[in-house]
Structures are given as C-alpha cells and as structure tokens.
Amino acid sequence: MTLKGKVQQLIDQAFEEYTDLFLIDFTISSDNKIVVVIDGDEGVVLQDCINVSRAIEHNLDREEEDFALEVASAGATAPLKLLRQYHKNVGRKLKVVTLEGEKIEATLDQIAEDKLTLKWKTREPKPIGKGKVTVEKEVTIPFDSIKEASVIISF
C-alpha cells in the first residue's frame, strides 16, 4: 500500500473514533510532508489535532518511510469546501462569490441538499415619496453555482 493509501486509511479510522471531526483536505509532498486539515461540527480544539496526529503517527513506521506530519484546523476564515461546514455555520454571516462573479454578504439562513438560502437587510428608496425603507432580501443559490464561500468574522 502506498503512503497516501495508508494515511487515508488511518485518517478514516481516526474519524470513526472522533465522529464530530471530519477531513477537509490532506496532501503529501514529494519529500513526504503530510499535511492534514480537519474541521469539526463544534469547531476544532488543539486536543482534536493532537488526537488525529497521534492516530496517524503512531501507526506509521518511520523505519519504512521517513515523514513529517502536520495536523491543523481549517481556520476561521478559510473557504468552506464541504456541505458539513455550511451546516455548522447556519446563522452566521457569509461572503459568497458565485461562478458569475456576483458577491453577496449575507446571513446563512437555510441549507437544502443542493442549495443554500441567504438573507440580508438593505435600505432602498421608498416606492412613493422621499426617503428610504429597510427591506429584507433573500436569495437561494445552488451549491454548484458557488465559486467560493467563507465566514465573515465580526467583532
């Protein structure tokens, strides 16, 4: 079995034990540097990274293959890649860029199997008379139309 196959198998086993965690990405460079990026339904703490790292490292033989291992969380501002990441961010403000280049900053309201719904408020001119009125807007975007989406962190 290749190193990549072994690592994939060990990652899968780790996530069977730690079911609230999931894999975002993992790569192995030509010099055997293994980088594993994880996320969790309730976020990721340092101990989660340690647990996954140990599950991989303790089951690989350094005598067989020399390697370096890095396990990290996806990060708060990293783009969302998996449907599971969208579910944990319902109610948070997202920046979504569609394939057509449209940029939307709005609150993630709902998720269906193949689409998400965003809501936001905007000020628009009154239909009659002077002044502006606050209007609530809503848009539904299919996941396959999203180029990139990330959480907006506000303080």
Image (tube, grey):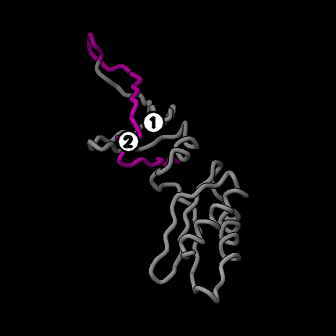
| Residue 107, x across and y down, in percent | 47, 36
| Residue 136, x across and y down, in percent | 41, 23
| Residue 52, x across and y down, in percent | 67, 66
State the image quarter where residue 84 is shown. top right
Give the residue at x 54% y 47%. Answer: 85
Give the residue at x 51% y 61%. Answer: 25
Is 97 above or below relative to 70? above
For label 1, count other residues whose C-alpha is less than 10 Å away and answer few (under 14), some (14-19) or many (20+).
Answer: few
Residue tagged 2:
144
| Callout 1 amino acid | Asp
Residue tagged 1:
114
Q: Are marks 1 and 2 in contact (CB under 8 Å)?
A: yes
Closer to the camera in the image, 60 or 36: 60
Is 133 above or below relative to 49? above
| Callout 2 amino acid | Asp
Task: Label 2, secondary structure: give it.
Answer: helix
Closer to the camera in the image, 60 or 116: 60
Q: Which residues are magenta?
A: 126-155
Is 78 above or below relative to 113? below
User: Whole-Å distance between the Cαs marked 1 and 2?
Assistant: 8 Å
Residue extending farthest bottom = 63
| Residue 63, x across and y down, in percent | 64, 89
Q: Earlier in the sequence, mark 1 or mark 2?
A: 1
Give the residue at x 44% y 30%. Answer: 119
For label 2, count other residues whose C-alpha is less than 10 Å away and answer few (under 14), some (14-19) or many (20+).
Answer: few
Residue extending farthest top = 128
Would residue 152 be counted in the magenta stretch?
yes
Q: Residue 26's mark?
A: none
Quadrant occupied by the N terminus: bottom right
